[in-house]
Amino acid sequence: MRVKCQQEHLNRALSAVSRAVPSRSVLPITQHILVEANNGQLKLSATDAETIAITYTITANVTQAGSITMPSRLLSDFVATLPRDEIEMTLAERSRQVSLACARNSASIGGMDPDEFPPIPSVEGAGAIEIEPERLREALEHVVFAAATDDSRPVLTGVDFAIGPQGIRLAAADGFRLAVFQLDLAGAGQEREVIVPARALGELSRLLAEAQQPARMTVNAGQTQVLFDLGHATLIANLIQGTFPNYQQLIPASSATRTVVAVDGFKQETRLASIFARDGSGIVRLIATPGAAGATGRLLVTARAEEIGNNEGEIDAEVTGEEAKIAFNSRYLIEVLNVISEPRVAIETSSPSAPGVLKPVGDDRYVHVVMPMFVQW
Amino acid sequence: MVNAATPTTRPPIRLLPPEVAARIAAGEVIERPASIVKELVENALDAGARTVEVAIWGGGIDRLRVRDDGCGIPAAEVADAFERHATSKLRSEHDLFAVRTLGFRGEALAAIAAAADVDLTTRPAGEAAAAVARSRDGRIDHLGSAGAAPGTSVEVRELFAALPARRRFLRAAASETRAVVQAVEAYALAYPAVAFRMQVDERRVLSTDGSGDVRAAFAAVHGEAMASALLQIAGERTAAGDGGDEARARVDGLVGPPHVHRASRRTLTLFANGRAIVSRALTHAVEEAYVGLLPGGRYPVGLVHITVPPDQIDVNVHPTKAEVRFRYERLVYSAVGAAVRAAVVQAGTPGAPLPAGLVTPSRAPGAQAAMHVATTVTPGADAVAVRHGAATQQPALPLPERLPALRALGQFDSTYLVAEAPDGLCLVDQHAAHERVLYERICAARASGAVEQQPLLAAVVAPLTAAQAALAAEQAGSLEALGFVLEPTDGAALIVRAVPAALAGGDPARVLADYLDRLAASEEAAGIDRAAATLACRAAVMAGDRLDIEQQRALLRALEQCEAPQTCPHGRPTMLHLSNEALARSFGRR
């Protein structure tokens, strides 16, 4: 193998694929990256051999085709510190020792037999769905954070993709909150439902940030794997098997109070309050008061920690319905406010103990349900 | 099938020959060398000995000897001493219920003689010569006289030589030795006015001076350093007894301050009317007094003497007399708990000593005390030193309960906060500190009924193991008080509807299972304190969590407000303090 490529390309490719490398593994070769040089391309692949595989292809000057695996950490760290120049990789026949030369640096890295590298599955299925990268990214950002990180109920560590003719409805929940985003797509194809690991989708978001062409999503016939093909990069994930909870019933159909506030102001007040709430289980209390006779109403955002003091902030609000009191975990509020890009958000509540709903005003694609905390008022 | 006993060949029932009966009975008393030593030492103490010497060889199995300078046995009574139920200590049935001596059943010598070869040499002070008796195979085969110092010496050889079945049950010599040493140590602690000397295979392992000073005896057994730190305890409780009499329990002794602890329960010895006893309940009473002050898996040290009127204790419960029964057990329990708690609380919870390198050698006199002076965070440290140094002095000053204002300087290793205190520098363990803050908040919230909960959007079923489910059922009250809302199912699983606010975020089923596991791991999982401590530990920031300066400030301010800021609920210190003085000294500025 003999190949030349640009340091910045290789560096970008390495930082993309190395995200799939498990931090700990019983299988040493999964800590490696598979490097394949062929047809003017250098393709890097990494997998944790369990849920995720990422490949990344860059253009290169291949004078002799070949392949090898190299330790991910060592290779990434080394390439990242090299100057922006051309890198030449050379691997002698029947050798496992790769020579890297760049500008006036050279190094030799020991590799492993590429045939022992876990196979990167090829996902083939009918009806690939084409999605503009920024739209897919937007959809993912609205839901991925709400997925459970604890794997005791595996389906909740994934995002539910309900695919239908109208598009894809993405949903994630962790037992305390639920995020649902409708991604409208004409001709998304036949009705299917798959659960994609949230971790894989987090990596997909990163890859999408620099994608130029539409992402093609393919689910294999057995509904066990999904492929996101971004052209220069691919991400393959094992789907989570199981049934996602029927979340429609968790979205309250009606509310007693609807409070509309500016997202920025609300976020700011919640952040302030959370500093005080941080120590007290993050409890932020909201009191919405309708304005008297045509005047604007207000939303009071408070947090208290007996030892440090109180914080009270007030923002203007359009409050329809009765006065409302409800307490939320500040983290849950801030995380959902962070993904709302519309200027205003509606908070729909019924009682201090019933789930609250947050919806961006003017964008009915997104619904976020949060369970309040029970506190003394 | 050859040897199968058929009805026709079954041997007739016969009374056992007396020697055999004696041997069987002896087994109840004589299990191992340590039990022989106990019987003989108790005889020596009952005989008014001022000095007791114990020597063993080969774990006491080969040979052991107990020699005292007590009143001895008159020559005429020597032969009777070997008879079963022969004793000078009980005269009537009535005496049995008011035993003031250690021995009383009159079984010791008879039982020992049934199990081993015994040589008895005894001389009352008034007599010219010592009487000698030799017992072989359970029978006296020689009676005579010889010259010897006043007192009694009993030598036992070849334990269980005639009872190979029993001999097989003995442990290795090393573990028999350990048992004997432990037994003798217990007496040495119980009887500081008696000089105990002990030899193992001709090597001196223990020597107390018999001065009557309990601390000196403790020092001889457990070392000077620990002994000097001990706190004096004293207390008495009385109540109306059920028989018209007065129930009474006196407690005194020495216990360790909270920063002195051991990994086993062996360094805590209990005595009832001078007798070392084993009592789970009373051990628990002592440990309860340290709840929240000792780290998990560590146990208090000390010795606790309980004195009750002789008719309020039954020592005839168990052949080895290690277990006793108190007529008014609740009273004794509360007397022990109160006495220990009072001493421990008074001692406060001094900040943990700093690494030795930071303590200058120039303050060496009474190194232990000096270390505390130099390194405790409390301005009242001199009072601590006084207390650690002398046995009887009471603290001059109560320790301040709260911390001075601390200014956050930063975080080190994502584990410790560095803070400026008025008189130096503090390193605060963020997990331990947060645990303390949460613990007090949880207790306060529970006390005021303001429990904060995070209910679930949809209830989940938590599959539990049988052990977890049993614990959850047993602790149902405290789980609810902390904020769990749980419902039973048909099986071991529970439906989780809400979790305590402090635990929100994780998977609720796992939160519950983890919580139960932690609760089970914290020993004697009873009482709401442990439940709250477990919750605090589960919810607190961990070592390795990065905290921004705002969070550091908030944590320190919250810690300042705590009732007992110096330790986490499990008793680990929350902070180390480097005084300006210690720093200046370390840098050679003073």
Image (cartoon, coloured by chain):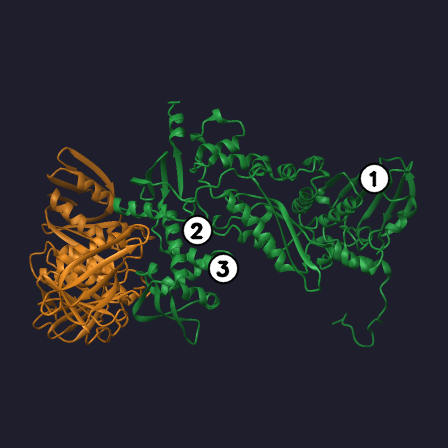
> Which amino acid type is marked by label 3?
Ala
Q: Mark 2 lies on which chain?
A: B
x%, y% of residue B123? Answer: 87, 40
Separation of disc 1 and disc 3 at Cα?
51 Å
Q: What element carries label 3?
A: loop
Instruction: Specify the colour of chain A.
Output: orange
Question: Which image quadrant is residue A226 in?
Answer: bottom left
Report the quarter where the N terminus of chain A lies. top left
Marks 1/3 same chain: yes
Q: Name the residue under label 1.
A: B151
Say which quadrant the C terminus of chain A sits in.
bottom left
Label 2 vs label 3, nearer the camera? 2
In the image, taking residue B479 as reference, residue A333 lies left or right, namely left
Label 1 to label 2, Cα distance in Å? 53 Å
The colour with which the image depicts chain B is green
Looking at the rendered structure, the kind of residue marked 1 is Gly
Residue lying at 38% horizontally and 26% vertically, measured from the top left: B584
Which circle marks residue B569 in the picture?
Answer: 2
Res A200 label? none
On the image, which quarter does residue A365 sit in? bottom left
Q: Mark 3 points at which residue?
A: B525
The relative height of residue A120 versus residue B209 in the rendered view (above or below) is below
